[in-house]
Image (tube, helix red, strand yellow):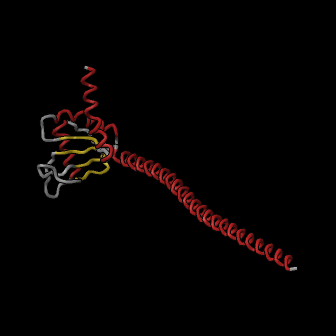
Amino acid sequence: MEKRVQEVEDRNTKIVDSVEEMSHIVNSALDKYTDNSDQIETLNKAIKALQNTANNRELDEVHVSKLRSLEEDVVEMKWRSMKNNLIFTGLRYQQDEDTEMKIRDFLNKELGINNNISFGNVHRFGKKDRNGIRPIVARFTSRRDLDHVLKCAYRLKGTDYGIKEQFPKEIEIKRKELYPILKQAKKDNN
């Protein structure tokens, strides 16, 4: 009987050892599972952050594209509002002047244009030039009249006066960049 009791105790000890070993294995597996779960959660957060970043970049690209399109539309609208305008420079300022009459007199005396030109609006604007004179902008109601004045503007060569078309600042900058190329192309063709 003692032998049997000993066998049972040995078996019991083996079972307890086996259960403890299984418990260690299960605990180790649980620890690895917890670590893996934490890593998976961290990776999922990183993936979501990357997806959000990618989505934000796509949205940014869409917004930038729309913004550029809007800027181009604004420049075009500015150009359309200015396309019948001429800028006159070099005309001295006089107290209580009527700028429209001043332009009419200038066109008559300097360019020999006597016909009745119709203006929408004529006024001084901007900063004074090197002589302390502000330019005058005149809106022509007829493109034909504007073109006629531009054709006669060559007569001002060598004087302090100038006439030019009005463009938005963005277009003026682009024209300054392209002018040397135009000049060289004309030179190459002659």
- The percent position of residue 80, horizontal first and vertical second, equals 38, 45
- The percent position of residue 96, horizontal first and vertical second, equals 16, 58
- Left or right: 85 in relation to 102: right
Q: Nearer the viewer, residue 139 or 33?
A: 33
Q: Nearer the viewer, residue 110 or 24?
A: 24
- Residue found at x 51% / y 56%: 53
- Residue found at x 25% / y 40%: 164
Is 69 drawn above or below residue 113 in the view shown? below
- The percent position of residue 154, horizontal first and vertical second, equals 20, 33
Q: Name, please, the residue furthest toward the top.
A: 190
Q: Nearer the viewer, residue 75 or 14?
A: 14
Q: How many marks on residues?
A: 0
Q: Name, please, the residue furthest toward the front.
A: 2
Is 169 drawn above or below residue 38 in the view shown? above
Q: Quadrant of the N terminus?
A: bottom right
Q: Is residue 154 visible?
A: yes
Q: Is residue 140 visible?
A: no
Quadrant hosting residue 95: bottom left
Q: Quadrant of the C terminus?
A: top left
- Residue found at x 56% / y 63%: 42
- Left or right: 77 in relation to 110: right
- The percent position of residue 9, horizontal first and vertical second, equals 80, 77
